[in-house]
Amino acid sequence: MAKNDKPNTQQRPATPSTIGNGGELHQTAGRGEVLTTQQGAPVADDQNSLRVGDRGPLAMEDAHFREKIFHFDHERIPERVVHARGYAAHGYFENYASLRSITKADLFQRKGERTPAFVRFSTVAGSEGSADLARDVRGFAVKLYTQQGNWDIVGNNIPVFFIQDAIKFPDLIHSVKPEPDRGFPQAASAHDNFWDFASLMPESTHMLMWAMSDRAIPRSFRFMEGFGVHTFRLVDAKGESRYVKFHWKPKLGMQSVLWDEAVKINGADPDFHRRDLWNAIGQGDFPEWELGLQVFDDAFADAFEFDVLDPTKLIPEEVLPIRKVGRLVLDRVVDNFFAETEQVAFCTQNIVPGIDFTNDPLLQGRNFSYLDTQLKRLGSPNFTHLPVNAPKCPFANFQQDGHMATQFRAGRTNYEPNSWTGDDRGPRETADGFTSFPAVDDGPKRRIRPESFADHYSQARMFFVSQTAIEQQHIVDAFVFELSKVERPDIRVRMVANLRNADEDLAARVADGLGIAVPMASAAAVAADTTLAPSAALSILGTPLASLAGRKLGVLVTDGASAAVVRGLQQAAAAEGMTMEVIAPKVVGARLDDGSMLPAQQRVGGGPSVLYDVVAIVASADGATLLATLPAAKDFVTDAHAHAKFIGHVAAVEPLVVATGLSDLVDDGYVDLAAAGGPDSLISAARAVRFWDRLG
Ligand code: HDE
């Protein structure tokens, strides 16, 4: 990887003498390869602390020891109170065309222009060390270093949210995080407190549908959508405003795992999503999303069935088409996880001229909140000086001092107005600086929830009926799973009572799964509008994949396996843009029937089939007999079968299939690799991702 080619001898950049040249990661390299203290003094012995005599006490004057231990003791900063577990990469946003007619935002003015970007994906509920495949919303936070300042679109992979008013956010998060007395469960919504809260908050029903759907267990960050969630404004040069909803559409299409896979992936590779992003970028397989806009005016907003300020509602693409305006490409992994991924400070209030907020009460609350969290985590108002957070355009103001200030203005003035000239004068306002859209708002000061936010079920129902039968079943299964982890029966009943308001069929199936009678529906402020048309775009499986690019083929091989078949698989995978990983009884690999040595990346057991999108088993007769004795090899097949994967095989693997007891269940999802064009047939069949018929 190119980044590893970088010599580790860079000089520490000169301390900037004026505000405005931040943005570069300061790498420390000491004096070439010499180990030094933080003060730069060369260290002669880093193995032994200074002591008196052979067995005497340590000397207090050992400044090197003291500094080293002191620094180590302070390595941790508070993890994010939400979205603690995350992974990020650098890249750029590129315009397809100028958007001058709808926004004056500088980054959108010129076709083909690239704006540097930093994107962090995350789960919400789990701690920093939690597993990647928790059932959870994924954060999708994008920092765009525009020429007119940093613009943060701090979104999720789900276009709506649980609550309508930011004042309920601490309650929501408290309810989903580990319960305060016992400190568990970690990274799981399947517990009493969450469902107690959710079932008492009917406004969460729409989001619950998404959270119980396959959207909440994505196969990879690369295969999920992103959303700005709130309605924002675009403001043009004439000061006119249009409303906008932001969408990120993955170029590789969407894909999710099955719940049973998620559970097993969490054990086999808790870093599954991180590793996927790291590897993809390292291989030059740069993940890409298109930025889509839904732009609308007051007339649309007034006519639309729901309040566009209500963050529990979306605007279906079929009602308001998405215009693709550019692409976001992630092409560089971080140099240092802590310096960049951990210290990046997204703030919803970071917007630029040409973009503005609306009165979405959740957004307004967020705008107030994010500075606090950065101060808490990063410890100083100067977190903006950190390279990952500093703008890449010039910036200048009279803010000064504070803990860890590293940027300062030379010159005599630190106030304005001033009458100094030249270098002492300092920066001044500009006519084309940020101005808020002059929306007119008036009314009595009250704590209220507007009537226009009262419908909690129509879009929940729309989401459910927009899913394919398989996806609906997954939603039912997820509700049943989660509510079965709830200990208090009344909470289960209350949740099902709410679901009745969204969809009777769903409620009945969940009740059946829980073994309870369908309860009376809870009182709904507004009955669900059952005439809302389904939106195909809400379904993942509704849009078949064009290709398996970016996916992974896992090939279980043994000594004596057919070299021709293995080569065929390699070619078919490469032609599709897939990567192929070899799993063998020993990690050194397998000697194929042409005498060549095929190196393995995984030993059987270390590379279970849940880690792959498509699997193949290419064994010799002896090899298959050996595999049939290995529980992990049998699991490889039984899991692939249970997860409805397409399975490539050769006749010789029969003993292994027999050992799994699946011989009579072999179906059209099993592809004979020895047949003419076998490997290609496997890949083209697998574009359906799963052989769903197997699951009945
Ligand atoms: Fe956040 N959120 N949030 N949030 N959020 C944070 O900021 C908050 C909300 C989202 O990768 C925190 O830097 C409040 C909605 C993402 O670093 C904190 C409310 C959406 C990330 C915070 C919300 C999000 C955060 C914690 C209710 C989707 C991770 C650490 C009004 C549109 C960013 C931090 C990253 C992070 C507050 C609701 C997305 C505490 C008060 C809705 C992707 O400031």
Image: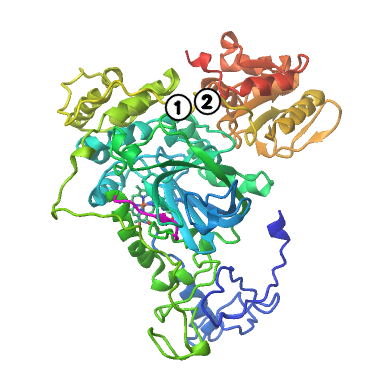
Counting from the top left corner in percent of width and height, residue 151 is at 47, 58
- Foreground residue, 626 or 572? 572
* Callout 1 crowding tier (Cα within 10 Å): few <14, some 14–19, many ≥20: many
- Foreground residue, 137 or 426? 426
- Foreground residue, 99 or 254? 99
Q: Which numbered disc covers residue 188?
A: none
Ligand 1 within 8 A of label 1's CB? no
Instruction: State which quadrant residue 535 falls in.
Output: top left
Q: Is residue 361 left or right of residue 623?
A: left
* Callout 2 crowding tier (Cα within 10 Å): few <14, some 14–19, many ≥20: few
Q: Is residue 353 magenta?
A: yes
Check the image and tell me how it is coloured. rainbow
Q: Is residue 644 magenta?
A: no
Q: Is residue 128 visible?
A: no
Counting from the top left corner in percent of width and height, residue 695 is at 48, 16
Residue type, label 2: Thr
Counting from the top left corner in percent of width and height, residue 686 is at 62, 23
Q: Is residue 187 left or right of residue 655?
A: left
Q: Which numbered disc covers residue 539?
A: 1
Q: Which residue is mark 2?
A: 543
